[in-house]
Amino acid sequence: MGLLEPFPPAARVAVLGVGSALRGDDGAGLGVARRLQAGRARVRSGRLAAFIGHTAPENLTGEIARFRPTHLVLVDAADLGREPGAVELVPRERIAGASFSTHALPLPLLIGYLERATGCRSIVVGIQPAQLGLMRRLSPEVQRAVGRVVADIRGAIKALRARPPAPRSRPGGGASPPGRRADLACAAR
């Protein structure tokens, strides 16, 4: 299976790509969001929105909240201590410890705000950069990683089409329907 198993209770998935397009592989999250936006017509489910957050993703919180996602997938370059192009889910307890690219607002604060504002669940996908040089393009390893993450997200969204959307409660109101997990089923590579 891919990085993201089909989202069990998801009705609407927001993907937030963050990073700097001016710093080589720091733009990995932006690459994921751009490719999802470009290929949105192929998904055709109305369940996916991709947001390009650059280095100030907090500027998109209103737009993301209006989309009313059940799940948020934040994608960023992160020093995971692995080989370039490695992709992994970064557990919440490691978000503050993992070395993410520079953002105006710390990612844990941003994620916490969006979870409270929308009632969504969230995950962070980290992509190990090869280089962060100024005015450089994505490295081949990170380009391949971006492609894998995009394919995994598209696959998870397509799997949702066979099921009716999960009921959507107001932020802070109610739990997931009985017998359904409230988190994303994920398997790290």
Image (spheres, rainbow, N blue to C red):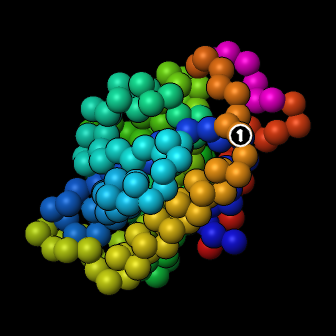
Give the residue at x 11% y 69%.
135
Give the residue at the far right of this rendering: 179
User: Which image quarter holds the N terminus?
Assistant: bottom right
x and y percent of residue 179 in the render?
88, 37
The residue nearer to you, when weighing 34 against 136, is 34
Q: In the rendered view, does 58 fall on the left or right side of 185?
A: left
Q: Is residue 105 above or below residue 41?
A: above
**Residue type at the position of mark 1:** Pro
Assign the magenta stretch its main secondary structure.
Answer: loop
* Residue 171, x across and y down, in percent: 59, 19
When asked about the image quadrant of residue 62, the answer is: top left
The residue at 44%/59% (across/down) is 42
**Image x and y of residue 153, in percent:** 53, 59
Instruction: Say whether residue 109 is magenta.
Output: no
Relative to 21, say whether 114 is above or below.
above
Is 92 on the left or on the right of 162, as rendered? left
Stretch of the chain drawn in magenta:
172-177
Q: Which residue is mark 1?
A: 164
